Every structure is written in structure tokens, then in C-alpha cells.
Amino acid sequence: MSTPQRRATRSPRPGARPRVRVRTRERAVGATRPKVRPWSAYAVATAIVLLVVAGLLFYLDERSSRGRTQVVGTAPGPDHLEVHVLLQRVDAAAQTLTTRVLVRAYGALEMNGNPLVPAQDVLLETTSLEQTALRYPAGQQIATGTVAFDLYGGRVTDYPFDRYHALIGFRATIGGRPAPVVVAIEEADPFFAFAQESRQSEGGAVAVTERISRSRSTFILAWFMMAAMWALALSVLVAAWLIVRQRRGIVWPALGWMAATLFALVGMRNAAPGSPPIGSVLDYAAFFWAELLVAVGLTMIVVRGARIEGGHRPAP
């Protein structure tokens, strides 16, 4: 019998590197399939749903509070005047509250059952300094009128923490005789919230003091804008510090991003609800400092980068 011959194994050459088989396929498959933790995805989805639900609840609460009508004054009988006041627009810079006033006559004060046609001449006196009285002739249909009331007790530069007061009052006479008045107030300005602070009803005259402040949505958006300004400014400053520390020279893409941020902050500030003037709390709390930090980061990169780039000799 012949014995099988064994294959001669070659001895490795001195100094030769050993062969290493790399399982590239397994590594590629493992790299393209990262481990995903299901609980983290569920947590993110749950957080998003909760935020949306909370936002809707805030909206419904603010909407219901705006839908309420304030009724001031009582009528001793069916013969009285009802003054409907719609709070249309607050101009904080001009310190005025623009309203729409509609008068209705009831009982013996109306003609042929139409509350918009008075049976006698109606004189409605107001607390407005611009339009102190409204006149409605007998037998003619009453039309809505615009009345501006003055604001007091607040400064527009306190935005978004500014608060004001307005005195809304009426007294009516029909045919030269005093008539009872009932005032119904409804708000319509989305940028402000109104609350009744005090009321007075004496001798047929009715007066209401309204406390006026920024609405909840305006207040939340103003706080978000201040936080976003600080976040953007600090991001630019940290990026500039890293570029200077690592001696990267002038990084043109980074300069473009920072310059765009400098002008984007101006657009964000001008988009603030209510158009606050320059010099408000919003500016001193965030905008001025954010612009300063972005400008410092830009200048720092250019100055240090120019020194580094200037020290490099051009290739021959």
C-alpha cells in the first residue's frame, strides 16, 4: 500500500506579514443595520403628541375666554338702551383703544318694534376725549360708530410685559330725559387680553375700567424669540471659538452662516407680534446682545484667520 503523501507546507518567509482575513461583508451588514431602541422612538412620539394636545388645550382655553361678553348695568324695566361695545384694536404706541359702538333701544324707546330706530332723539355721552357724544335722531336707523378711548398706566417699551387701563363709560338722554343704560363689552383684538377691573353704575351712567395686557400667545411667542436669539448667538460664538482655537484660518462656509445669522436676527426681531418699538425689554434682554455676540464671533474669525492665512507661503 502506498501512503498518501502530505502536502508540503511552506514556511513563512522571515519578515513577511501574516495574512489577515477581514470579513468585510459582516462588517458592512452590521454597519448598515444599527440597533434601534423601540422605547426611545415611542418616547419621542409620545412627547410630540403631548405637546400638540397641550397646545390645543391652551388654544381652546384662550378662545373660550375671548368669547365671553361683559355685561355692566341693570335695567329697571323694559325701557332702556343697550350699548354694545366691540374692542377692536389697541394701539399701544398711540395710547388709544379703538372700539365699535352700536346702540339699541328697547321698550317704549324703540319705534315700531325696531330696536335700531329710536322713537325720540338719543344723546349718548362717552368718556372718550376725541368723541365725547354720539347723536341719533328720532325715526332714523342707528348706525355703528367708531369711538377711541385713551389708555393710561403703561409704557409700550415694557413689551411684552406692558399693561394698560382704559375707562369706558356712557350716559344717555332721550328727549332730554335720562335713560337707563346697559353696556355689553366684547373683545376682538388677538394681540391683547382684556379683564374687567372695576365698574360703576350710578344715575343711569355706566363706567367700566378695563385692564389690558398682552395675550397669552403673544407672551409665549415673545419669550420663544428671546430664547431663540440667545441660542443662535451662543451657537455662533462657540463655533467661532472652536475655529480660532484649532487655527483653521478663514473658513468661508462658516462666515456665510454667521453673516446670515446676523441679518436673520434682525428679521426675527421685526416679526415680533405687536410691532414693539426699538428700545423695548425684548431688545435689552436678547436682541442687542445677540447681535453683539454674532458680530464678535465674525470679527474674531476674520482677524485670527487673516493672520494664519497671511503666514502661509504660496506654493512654488
Image: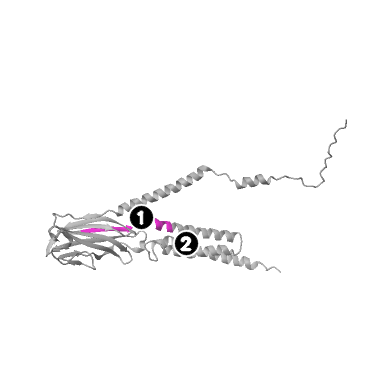
Name the colouring of the figure: one colour
Choose between 220 and 11: the one closer to the eye: 11
Q: Quadrant of residue 195?
A: bottom left
In the picture shown, does residue 9 fall above or below 230? Answer: above
Rendered-image quadrant of the C terminus: bottom right
State left or right for residue 232 relative to residue 28. left
* Residue 232, position as x, y percentages in the image: 49, 59
Q: Residues within 10 Å of mark 2 (few under 14, many from 20)?
A: many
| Marked residue nearer the N-terminal end (2 or 1) | 1
- Tell me where residue 155 appears, x and y as whole percent: 33, 63
In whole angstroms, how far apart are the C-alphas of marks 2 and 1?
25 Å
- Given residues 223 and 27, the one toward you in this image is 27
Residue at the image point whose x is 52% and y is 60% from the top:
236
Question: Relative to residue 153, is residue 47 depicted above or below?
Answer: above
For the residue marked with disc 1, what is the amino acid? Arg
Q: Position of residue 138 (x, y in %)?
A: 14, 66
- Magenta highlight range: 207-225
Local secondary structure at mark 1:
helix
Amino acid at circle 2: Ala
Q: Circle 2 sits on which residue? A: 290
184 is within the stretch colored magenta? no
> Callout 1: 10 Å neighbours few (<14), some, many (20+)?
some
Return the mark for residue 25: none
The image shows residue 32, relative to residue 304, as above or below, that is above
Q: Does the magenta-highlighted stretch encompass residue 210?
A: yes
**Quarter of the figure with the N terminus:** top right
With respect to residue 25, does 229 lie above or below? below
Image spot of residue 124 (x, y percent):
18, 64
Question: Which residue lies at the image location 43% right of the left edge and 47% below the top edge?
Answer: 49
Q: Which residue is mark 1?
A: 216
Total numbered labels: 2
